Every structure is written in C-alpha cells, then in structure tokens.
Amino acid sequence: MAVEGSDKVTRVIWKAGEIAEGTDWVATEIAIALVYNGISHVVMMATPADLEDFALGFSLSEGILESAKQLLDCEITETDKGIELALTITAEPFAKLKEKRRNLVGRTGCGLCGAESLDQAITEPAMVTTELALSHEALQKASSALAAQQKLQQQTGAVHGAAYCNQQGEILLVREDVGRHNALDKLLGALAKKQHEQELGFVLVTSRASYEMVAKTTSANIPLLAAVSAPTSLAIELAEKSGLSLVGFTRTDRHVVYANGQRIN
C-alpha cells in the first residue's frame, strides 16, 4: 500500500548470478516552487507531502515570516514540471522580502545567495530562551521509537525524518522528506500551527546536525536538537552561542552531548 510521498517503479535485481524482476516503492522527489504574493522566491527539491507545513516552516525558519499569523493563505497547484506553493503573506514581511530580493539581482554562482560578506553569510542564530530538563533515558526512548514512526522511510529507505518529542521521550509528531532541511521545516511548520497546545520538548533528526539545522531549530526557540549522525564544527559553535543543547550520534545505548549539556541529566 502506498504511503504519501512514494511512487511505484519496476526494477531488476541481480544477486549471486540470478536476476529477478519486480516492483519497488521509491521516495517521490519533485521541484516545488515557493511564490510569495505572486513573486517566485525559491525552488526546492522535496517530497510532495505535508506541503502546507513545509511552506510555513520554511518561511519561519528562513526569517521570511515572524509568526504563523503572517501567512494568510497557501494555494497548492500541480503542473507538469512540479508543484507551486502560492503563499499570500501580510504587507510587512513581504516588503522585507522584496528588499532582500533586490540584493540578489545580478549575482551568479553564490553558495549562500544574498550574502555579500562572511558576516552576512553566517548570521548569528536566535537565542534560545526556553528551558528544558531531560533525562538521558528519555533521549534513548525517543531514539528507539523513531524508526517505527517513519512510514515513508520504511517503505522507501530514502528519506530523512524529523520528530518532536516531549520531556518523557514520547514522539508527538513526525515529518519526512528526501531532504533533511525539508523534513525539519515541515516539522517546524506543523508545530507552529499548534503552538498554543505545544508541549515542552526537543527535536530529533535522522541526519547530521549542520549549521542550518541548528539555525532552524533555534528559530523556533526549541531548546535541544538531537541528531542520529555527527554535528559539524560550525553547528557546535553556534549551538554554544545560542544556548541550544546539541546532541549527536543519538543511537541505541549511546549519545554524545556537544553543547549546553546542562539540560540533560
């Protein structure tokens, strides 16, 4: 049975000199354009599931919006080349976005588009003001439970997961995507919709912890990010500065605390 975000394909398997034909489920990857008030902003390669969550989460974590209330509407249109997310946002963030776009005109080949200097490229992440008391056992409980809740990963073996977990290590919400940043944006968008009822907790991701993953987590004022794989040096540095607790190699019977470990006992 298909899980949203998967496609059925035919394949041929060679094993020990034998050939077998059949079908497999693979993760869907498609071009998704984010258009703000009629102006195209960016095209992302992503899995076409939970797209309203993605649109909101991306807008918040990239600093385009400051709150979910600034997103008035999100219209999803499928085309022969991909999917367009037409977002209607309020006047203030749209004015700021247009000013930022003016800074992009005439540039090519930029790694961090819109940045004219190193100071602009690597911005200071938001400071974390939320407190959290978490046990090592709760971290392990969440880590052990995540795989069973990744339905798309179980079917395709090709996607990342991002989960929001409470202080007891119970997984409350999971989002998946072929891109680790996209999975986290989808999670943050879903959480932003439910902010009034959100339990205190942390984020667990099935990827490495890069600078961008730290920045996106702090933008939501979430106090702890745990990753299944390793963090980068810049991720650790920025986690320390922002007050984010950063954990890597979160696996069975083991995890490594890299920054602000005072929240974990």
Image (cartoon, helix red, strand yellow):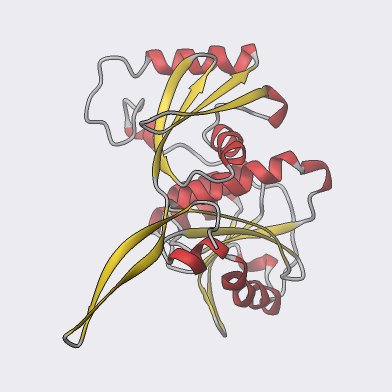
Instruction: Determine whether 76 is above or below 189 in the image.
Output: above
Give whichever of 67, 128 is nearer the camera.
67
- In the rendered image, residue 197, in percent from the top left (x then y), is placed at 83, 47
- In the rendered image, residue 62, in percent from the top left (x then y), is placed at 52, 34
Residue at 37% x, 16% y: name it: 103
What is the quadrant of the N terminus in the image?
bottom right
Q: Is residue 127 visible?
A: no
Q: Is residue 123 visible?
A: yes
Query: Residue at the front extreme?
Result: 21
Position of 186 compared to 129: left or right?
Answer: left
Query: Residue at the right extreme?
Result: 197
Q: How many marks?
A: 0
Residue at 59% x, 44% y: name it: 50
- In the rendered image, residue 4, in percent from the top left (x then y), is placed at 55, 52
Residue at 49% x, 64% y: name it: 153
Query: Residue at the left extreme?
Result: 17
Instruction: Determine whether 123 is above or below 224 in the image.
Output: above
Position of 117 compared to 239: left or right?
Answer: left
Instruction: Determine whether 113 is above or below 156 in the image.
Output: above
Give whichever of 99, 143 is nearer the camera.
143
Give whichever of 203, 126 is nearer the camera.
203
Give whichever of 39, 215 is nearer the camera.
39
Instruction: Please tell me in which quadrant of the rendered image residue 223 appears.
Output: bottom right
What is the quadrant of the C terminus in the image?
bottom right
